[in-house]
Image: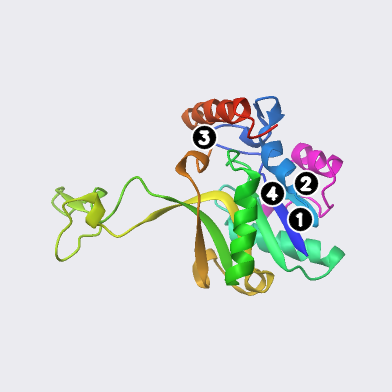
């Protein structure tokens, strides 16, 4: 039993109303919601939102009715983990225990269905507490990410004893991106945060790992989404 979940608050400081903003003829949320509803591996889909408009939109598309998100989970500082725990609890009241909780960030609309399948396949094969989508980071704290010291001088964020003079010498680091999360329900019920257990990466291409945090991000994603559509990668 796989539960598909989309979290979509009404508010956003970077791009106001972004989750229901139109992108290539669809509300932003629908690029992700449609992937869950179309997947033959997902048994039930739910939208968690504090927006009556977004929530009703999800119900009309066939999502389970769990009610609007509680106020304490609707702030811009509310942790994703608490939102997931609330949604899992409300869904399991209706359908019984789940085998996997699959979350897609609606602000990462460039994912393709094969990314979802890859996350579910990795979860089934490795049986971790969670699979989290990641991209190889373009910056590295061992090499070219910097901080200032007490004197205001620049220093490498995570210096190594032997020093790093080329990117290839630095340990691999990843960007956490919101394409796919697959979570073991027993872990979600009992843990207090994302990284408390055994969390493993699903490496996805950087060109699909972009997230909408600003109008600049929106313009880049708009362009890349147009390329995906022109190449026949999505409807």
Task: Specify the color scheme.
Answer: rainbow
Q: Are marks 2 and 1 in contact (CB under 8 Å)?
A: yes
Q: Which residue is mark 1?
A: 42
**Gap in angstroms between the C-alphas marked 2 and 1:** 7 Å
Q: Which residue is mark 4?
A: 6
- The image quadrant of residue 79 is bottom right
As for residue 7 lying within the magenta part, the answer is no
Estimate how packed mark 1 is, as few (under 14), some (14 to 19) or many (20 or more) residues with alpha carbons within 10 Å. some
**Mark 1 or mark 4: which is in front?**
1
Q: Residue at x 52, y 41 (%)?
A: 208
Task: Give the extent of the magenta segment.
Answer: 50-71
- The image quadrant of residue 1 is bottom right
Quick one: label 1 or label 4, which is nearer the N terminus? 4
- Disc 1 is placed on an element classified as loop
Picture coordinates of residue 118 (x, y %)? 60, 55
Estimate how packed mark 4 is, as few (under 14), some (14 to 19) or many (20 or more) residues with alpha carbons within 10 Å. many
Q: Which residue is mark 2?
A: 37
Q: Is residue 208 visible?
A: yes
Quick one: label 1 or label 3, which is nearer the N terminus? 3
């Amino acid at each position: 039993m796989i539960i598909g979940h989309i979290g979509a608050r009404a508010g956003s400081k970077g791009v106001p109303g972004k989750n229901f903003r139109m992108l290539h003829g669809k509300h932003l949320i629908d690029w992700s919601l449609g992937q869950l509803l179309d997947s033959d591996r997902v048994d039930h889909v739910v939208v968690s939102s504090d927006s009556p408009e977004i929530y009703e939109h999800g119900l009309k598309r066939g999502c389970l009715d769990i009610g609007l998100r509680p106020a304490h989970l609707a702030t811009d500082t509310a942790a994703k983990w608490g939102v997931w725990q609330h949604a899992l609890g409300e869904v399991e009241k209706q359908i019984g225990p789940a085998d996997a909780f699959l979350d897609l960030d609606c602000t990462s609309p460039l994912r393709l269905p094969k990314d979802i399948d890859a996350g579910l396949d990795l979860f089934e094969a490795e049986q971790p507490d969670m699979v989290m989508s990641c991209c190889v980071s373009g910056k590295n704290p061992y090499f070219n990410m910097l901080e200032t010291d007490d004197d205001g001088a620049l220093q490498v964020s995570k210096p190594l004893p032997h020093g790093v003079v080329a990117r290839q010498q630095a340990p691999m680091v990843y960007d956490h991106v919101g394409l796919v999360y697959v979570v073991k329900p027993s872990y979600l019920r009992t843990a207090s945060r994302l990284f408390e257990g055994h969390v493993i990466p699903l490496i996805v291409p950087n060109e699909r790992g972009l997230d909408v945090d600003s109008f600049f991000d929106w313009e880049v994603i708009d362009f890349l989404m147009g390329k995906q559509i022109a190449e026949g990668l999505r409807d």
